[in-house]
Structures are given as C-alpha cells and as structure tokens.
Amino acid sequence: AQKITQTQPGMFVQEKEAVTLDCTYDTSDQSYGLFWYKQPSSGEMIFLIYQGSYDEQNATEGRYSLNFQKARKSANLVISASQLGDSAMYFCAMSRPYDAGNMLTFGGGTRLMVKP
Amino acid sequence: EAGVAQSPRYKIIEKRQSVAFWCNPISGHATLYWYQQILGQGPKLLIQFQNNGVVDDSQLPKDRFSAERLKGVDSTLKIQPAKLEDSAVYLCASSFRNSPLHFGNGTRLTVT
C-alpha cells in the first residue's frame, strides 16, 4: 500500500521568500509518480508539478521545484519568491505505477500562509 | 478547454435522505475519478472509471454509495441513505492517458 505523509499542518512565509513544504512517502512499487496540488479556499485542486520515480533530474515548473530524494523517500516542494496568491492548502500525492493518469493517494496537506 | 464540471456546488440534506452528484469530465478524457475530501484531510479515492467500466471501487462504501458512468462520459455519484459522517466535499476528476488529473470545483455536502 502507498502512504503519503505531510508533517507540517501549517506554515508561514514572508512574501518574496522561498519556502519548502515537506513530503515523505512509502511504497513497495519500483515505479511511481509524485505530484503536488494546490487547493485555494475556493476548493479546486490545481496541478503544480510532477516527478517520475525514474526521472534523474528534479522537476521544475516556473517558481515551483520538486526536491526528489529517492533514497530518503522524500519529495519536497520548493516555492521560490512567494506571492500572496500562494496562500492555500498544498497536497502531495502519489500515483501507481509510473503513470500520471492513474489514481492518486494524497497526503493530509499543508496550509501555507504568505505574509505581506 | 472547458474544465471538469460538477453540480450542485452545495447540498444540505438530513441524515437518511438520499443525494446525487453529477460530473461532466473534460472532453476526450477516458478516465474519471470520484474523491471524497473530509474537512481538514486530503482527498480519498472512492471510485475510478475507465470509459464506462469500473477500474477500482475498493474504497467505495457500497452499502450506501453507488456510482455510474453509463455512456462513458458523464457520471453520477449517489448516497442513499446519507449519514452524518458523509459530510464532505466530493471531487470529480478526469485524465487523458498519462496526463495529470484535472479536478472540478467539487460539491460540498452537509448532512444534518
């Protein structure tokens, strides 16, 4: 079975600073995908970034990067130059197997609050 | 492209009543998912469809929940009878082959 753990229930960051949101996972699968989604107060889930377990390079998408450490089973999200609009819930998720379209198992989420 | 459409946006019912939610996925997306998100938690998969067939419904409480996708496009999720613990946001998502899931805005259900 897959399990995703997000140990930070809430975090504050100053506007324009960088922030790291932690995510650790547990799986017996050799191939899998790791995702981050953003959920603003309006409720929709917005896809941010994807990392495949066999990808050697860390994924980047604009201000988002995924710090993938396979041996430690961690997939932390780094947001650079935080903006007020980044205030939201952030969820780490895993798919099985190495297929972005497969069903996702989500962590409990981290609430990020950006201070002006 | 148009996103995943869900309705209603909000629903309040009394326990033991029935309720149905509707989802229209992004055009061309063969895979459709229903997730339940209880307040303060991450979404939990209820059921996954590939076209009109069920891929995974292992976490669907089948004594009270049912879902269908008869023509491989729209889907409905039904709860009958509802319990207090069913209060949650019900999220529909769709995907095309290996693309990431695209989610709708969800239906917020309150059971009183």
Image (tube, coloured by chain):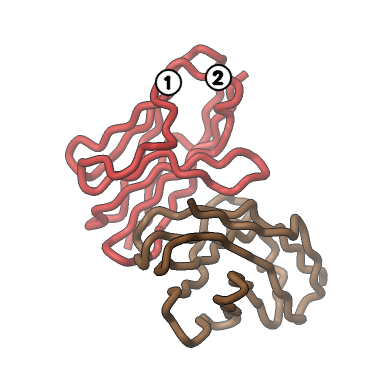
Letter of the chain that mark 1 sits on in the rendering? B
Tell me which corner region of the image, top left, top right, bottom left or bottom right, holds residue A8: bottom right
Q: Is residue A74 above or below residue B65?
A: below
Marker disc for residue B85: none
Letter of the chain that mark 2 sits on in the rendering? B
Residue B20: x and y, percent? 40, 27
Camera-side residue of A39 and A78:
A78
Q: Is residue A93 above or below residue A74?
A: above
Describe the element under mark 2 as helix, strand or loop.
loop
The residue that label 2 is drawn on is B83
Label 2: few (<14), some (14–19) or many (≥20) C-alpha neighbours in 10 Å:
some
Residue A1: x and y, percent? 48, 51
* Figure chain in brown: A
What's the amino acid at mark 1?
Arg
Apparent side of residue A111 relative to residue B16 in the rendered image (left or right): right
Tell me which corner region of the image, top left, top right, bottom left or bottom right, holds residue B62: top left
Q: Colour of chain B?
A: red
Residue A3: x and y, percent? 56, 54
Q: Residue at x 42, y 18 (%)?
A: B80
Apparent side of residue A54 relative to residue A25 in the rendered image (left or right): left
Direction bottom: furthest residue: A57
Tell me which corner region of the image, top left, top right, bottom left or bottom right, holds residue A80: bottom right
Q: CA distance from mark 1 to mark 2?
A: 9 Å
Describe the element under mark 1 as helix, strand or loop.
loop
Residue A108: x and y, percent? 64, 51
The residue that label 1 is drawn on is B64
Q: Residue at x 57, y 78 (%)?
A: A68
Tell me if label 1 and label 2 are in contact, CB under 8 Å: yes
First in residue order: circle 1 vs circle 2: 1
Apparent side of residue B66 relative to residue A47 in the rendered image (left or right): left
